[in-house]
Image (spheres, rainbow, N blue to C red):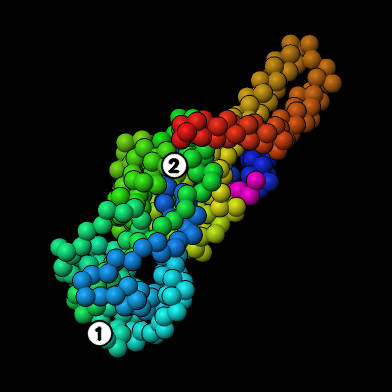
Amino acid sequence: MPLAFFAGIGAGSKKGILFKGGVSLEAMKNVKAVVMDKTGTITKGDFSVQKAIPAAGVSEAQLLAVAAACEKNSTHPIGVSILAAAERAGLDVENPQAVEELAGKGVRVQLKAGQALCGNRKLMEAHKIDLSQYKNEDYGTEALAALNGKFIGCLLINDTLKEDAASAISQIKSQGIAAVMLTGDAEQSAQAVARQAGVGEVHAQLLPEEKLEHLQQIRGRHGSVMFVGDGINDAPVLAGADVGAAMGSGADAAIEAADVVFMTSAMEAVPQSLAIARSTNRIAWQNVIFALVIKIGVMILGLTGRANMWAAVFADTGVAMLCVLNSIRLLYRRSADVDKQLASAGRQAAGRVA
């Protein structure tokens, strides 16, 4: 059995998939649902500010300046995109006097003009910011801003779907595995991405601890689950899943907590890893059954006086060599099979989109 798992780990490494041991490979064969984060997993995480919607009496420049000051020290893709937009507009971004990050909500900072907030609706609701005059019918991730308890506007930020996302999710479904998306983004934005990618079940506007709760519910409905994410907020969910998988471009905490790491950060690595895991376990059992059948058969023949020394040599060394050759198939044949399956799934997904 170790021969098959060594070959499976090698087959994964050739495609940029790092399995952290045979336990990960064995656990993946039972996966019934793949649960994915949106940003950086299904999408590229390459954000850009598409639109600024200031409140009455506030200019776009003022809105962007406050939001950029809030995100001055942020490394989150959304914060980086806001800072980039402020730089393009030629704004002088203020350094905040104090910064407090609120997980799953946004940031609260102290500026010369007063206390500023930048984040999602949950952040605004937590600070009792009046949003009655705000309406948004456009697609995109919302970054709401407030200054001294008053709503000053919203920035709409769009992300780009990964080119292989639709074909990868189609391939996951073709293996009889459910595809689910958990995200902290707004419902409208999450649903739009899910439609493009082909994800049937979506849970949006979730805090990190709520993602873990939904994961447990999904496990109850489907069975063993694999979670794929890349952010530091995904670390608890990665650790709580039956199999945790992290994108190689993600946060160190996510990579540390994961059982599998996709070094290429490509979505196609998800169905590839599942196919390799199932093939590895199948070949491992083939080796076990083949070895036991031959050895028991030769033992019986030996007891009846019908087996010679060469039969015993074959039952020992010969069977071991055949098991080695059977395991090595993972390094060659399976790679081509997976590529063919993904290409077929990609054509099917493209046909549905058309």
Amino acid on which the number 1 mark rests in the picture: Gly
Q: Which residue is mark 1?
A: 114
First-in-chain label (2 vs 1): 1
Mark 2 lies on a secondary structure that is: helix
**Quarter containing the N terminus:** top right
Q: Is residue 42 visible?
A: yes
Main SS of the magenta part reads: strand
Q: Mark 2 Cα within 10 Å, few/some/many (few <14, many 20+)?
A: many
Q: Which residue is mark 2?
A: 197
- Kind of residue indicated by mark 2: Ala
For the record, the magenta segment spans 15-19
Residue that appears at 15% across and 63% down: 132
Marker count (numbered)? 2
Q: Position of residue 101 (x, y in %)?
A: 34, 73
Horizontal side of 87 relative to 188 (left or right) equals right
User: Which of the numbered marks, if any, corresponds to residue 124?
Assistant: none
Closer to us: 327 or 50: 50
Disc 2 and disc 1: Cα gap in Å?
42 Å
Does 240 appear in magenta?
Answer: no
Q: Quadrant of residue 100?
A: bottom left
- Considering the numbered disc 1 on the image, is that residue within a helix, a strand or a loop? strand
